[in-house]
Amino acid sequence: MKTTTPSKLEKIIAAGHYAVTSECGPPRDGRPGVIEEKGKMIGKHVDAINVTDNQTAVVRQCSLSACIRLKSMGLEPVLQMVTRDRNRIGMQSDILGATAWGIHNILCLTGDHQRFGDHPNAANVFDMDSTRLIQTVKMMRDEGKLLGGHEMHEGRPKMFIGAAENPFADPFEIRVLRLAKKVKAGAQFIQTQCIYNMEKFKEWMRQLCDMGLHEKVAILAGLTPMKNVGMARYMKNRVPGMDVPDAIVKRLAGVPKEKQAEEGINILLEQIEELKQVKGIKGFHIMAIEWEEKVPEIVERAGLYPRPEVD
Amino acid sequence: MAGCLEGDCHFQSGNLRAKKRVGYVKKLLESIGVAGDRIAMYNLSAGMGPKFAEIAKEMTEKIRELGPFLKKSTPGAESAAPKTTSQASGSASLAVA
Amino acid sequence: MIMAKPKPIDEIIGYIGNFNKIMVAGCNGCVAVCEAGGMKEAEVLASALRIYFTQQGRQMKIDELSLTRQCDKEYLEEIKEKIYDYDAVVTLACGAGVQFMAEMYNDKFIFPGVDTCFIGVTEDQGYWTERCQACGQCVLATTGGICPIVRCSKRMLNGPCGGSASGKCELSVVAGHDIPCGWHLIFERLKKLGEIQRFGEPAGDKDWSHSRDGGPREIVREDVRP
């Protein structure tokens, strides 16, 4: 498969390996060392590291600044960008800034509504949505143009374009149509919402393969290890768009408290093995929220270490 | 405010609507520093004579306790001490729906 | 229709505290329909204010009236003599009416008595919901008659987002009541109309310069101007 950018993530996928990505959340203050620490912890075990963008509308150090730090450590960042907080001027500007620092991956998201976060009184922007942002990055990269028409003769973004999909949101029948639309807009890789309902996820994969989408876009399955049964219940009941089957909750509840974390990791590892058998899966996006230290263990036990080298 | 027993309204739901409006007026009165108890909703049927007398008495007592509704204002006066007037003002209007 | 709700009375009391002669001016247009600022509401407010200030021992003149509309000069002119009997007005018109009155009687204190909320519809008695954000370039022809700017909390043009669950917007959790997912509604409507193929095409760009973002707007119709 040909590559369209210098992105290491794209190269790994093009070479036919399973890609492994993870994410880190910047701190809620200006400390420089936090991202560095997280990067060091997981850097050797993943191909690329997503940096979240004011996730759940909670103010954190901006994604671009953290991506720059990871890049200067020799790691491969994925710039997550939500359309909630910046208009097209701000977003194109940040994309150019990321380009100037050699950042080659972007995940285009609409973003959680600000009423969920710590500044519910804020005005939101939503000048564009994620699909429009995908189109924008593609235009900047392939045509060298900004939305307003300005042409860039040099310094064009060379970004591998990603988007998120939630196979568990409603209505299910449009989840594949939406994916097709994002692919049409220019999405090249997808990181999914974390999966617990394997049956529903496999059905989604079947449908998108039937449409031939698996050949146009690389699906990276999102996975998050459960730390304990409380987390499972919370995610089941309080997080919109999250599908946690009763079986998972039962399994964790059936194990003593001090063993639940280990069980959570076991469940995730079983999922990886099962997903390796699913047509169209090109990799795994491991989101171990505030539990980044488990990522190396997960990657190793899943047989995905060491990470392949690409030039 | 007296209305029919709930479920028995001659006008189907006039008593329920009245209840909501009494609730609204109570809140409005409280918001301007007037005791919301000066208005109350009672439910009874037209045949419940003794009950009617009972609630009339109860309301009158309550109002007497609360005292005059509007203090007589003198030009330029700040909150004057409450003055009693010859009639007990602010008696609840009784209307049987 | 423009929907408004009454301001808390203590806020209004705060505005008029330094004045002695107040006119409460209702409006028989939109605010009367949503029971926030019509004649009935003007009467209740004036009465409540009279009670309050009398309780405070204040001698005040507080009178009420209601105009056909406050967004047209011909109706505002009706009070041009009367207004000079008062030193302040609490108007229950929407924000447009408040401002128009303040422009016409610009040496008077004109205070708002309602919070103007949205352009909407009467779903049921006592229940009004938002339908239009006056974006200036209506897209309803492409979405089966359901507006994504208003009904989608993120005004997406390529919705729904990943938070849509059981036909409800993710904000239902925070808002404490169910908000239908606008894009779920659009999907069902397009399905009904046999237009589901619209879902496969990325929507075009939205030109926000026609909306509030482009600055205060005006419409000039030369064909109907004098």
Image (cartoon, helix red, strand yellow):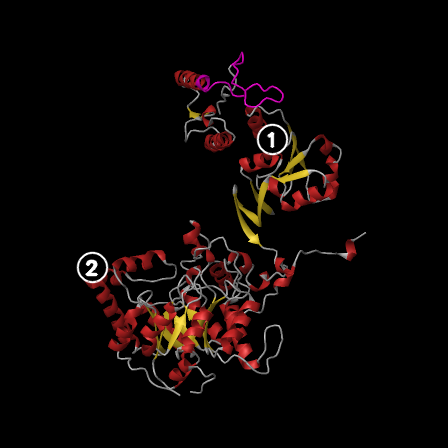
Where is residue A243? Give x, y as percent.
Answer: 34, 62
Circle 2 packing at 10 Å, graded few (<14), some (14-19), many (20+), is few
> Is there any visible trace of residue C217 in the rendered image?
yes
Tag 1 secondary structure: helix
* Figure quadrant of the N terminus of chain A: bottom left
| Pointer 2 residue | A257
In the drawing, what numbered circle is on residue C46?
Answer: 1
Question: Does C17 sit above or below residue A77?
Answer: above
A264 on left or right of C174:
left
Instruction: Give the magenta range.
Output: B63-87
Which type of secondary structure does the marked residue at label 2 adopt?
A: helix
Closer to viewer: mark 1 or mark 2: 2
Residue A232: x and y in percent read 29, 60
- Residue drawn at (33%, 64%), measured in percent from left and top? A290
Q: Main secondary structure of the magenta part?
A: loop
Nearest to the observer: residue C72 or residue A303: A303
Q: Residue furthest left?
A: A256
